[in-house]
Image (cartoon, rainbow, N blue to C red):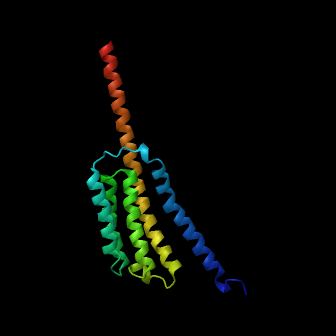
Amino acid sequence: ATLFGNDFVHLWLAWAAGDFLGMMLGLPGVLLLARFHRFNHSGSAGPWERYAWIAAAVASAAALFHFDHPALYYLFFPVGLLLVLRLSPPFSLLAILAFAMVAAGATVTGTGGFAFLSSDISGRILWLQLYLASLQFSALVLIGVLSQRIRAQTASRRALATARETRKEA
């Protein structure tokens, strides 16, 4: 018999998948926060609206994780993508982080749909991480597209200003 009994392969796979998902959830947020100053925060949402959206993410998590059906969790996807459209990338990930903290608290205490998908806490956390990864990756794709659009618009404005200035000088 091994140290872990006959369940070594299952434990190792759960550990590896959990660590991988944990890194994939944490790394983009850390990188965005490290470059917080590079983002234009004067986007669509004003300062109060930013905090209202973050509060809405927390309230959504509290409401969704009160129920025992995991299919309800996909109701947050449109709200999460609307967050990305209204907030700058760091504030979008901050709202998703706030949602994730409430979701993790509910899952660890045994409430919500993920609490009933697995009998052990590591299985519940793994299901939660998988859900949060799908939510975050959807948001990151939209953040990337919007960031590229903003860069292209900025470059186009610069080129147009340069062309106008050149035309005035000629």
Residue appearing at x 26%, y 54% in the figure: 48
User: Is residue 78 something that shows in the picture?
Assistant: no
Q: Nearer the viewer, residue 65 or 170?
A: 65
**Residue farthest along the top direction in this orientation:** 170
- Total numbered labels: 0
Q: Is residue 16 left or right of residue 121?
A: right
Whether 88 is drawn above or below 137: the answer is above
Image location of residue 132, percent across then percent down: 43, 67
Q: Is residue 144 visible?
A: yes
Q: Position of residue 81 (x, y in %)?
A: 33, 59
Residue 64 coordinates in the image, percent (x, y): 32, 74
In the picture, the quarter occupied by the C terminus is top left
Placement of 83 over or under 66, stated as above or below: above
Q: Residue at x 33, y 80 (%)?
A: 67
Residue at position x 34%, y 22% in the image:
163
Q: Quadrant of the N terminus?
A: bottom right
Residue under the point 42% across and 61% down: 136
Compare residues 125 and 167 and report the one nearer the observer: 125
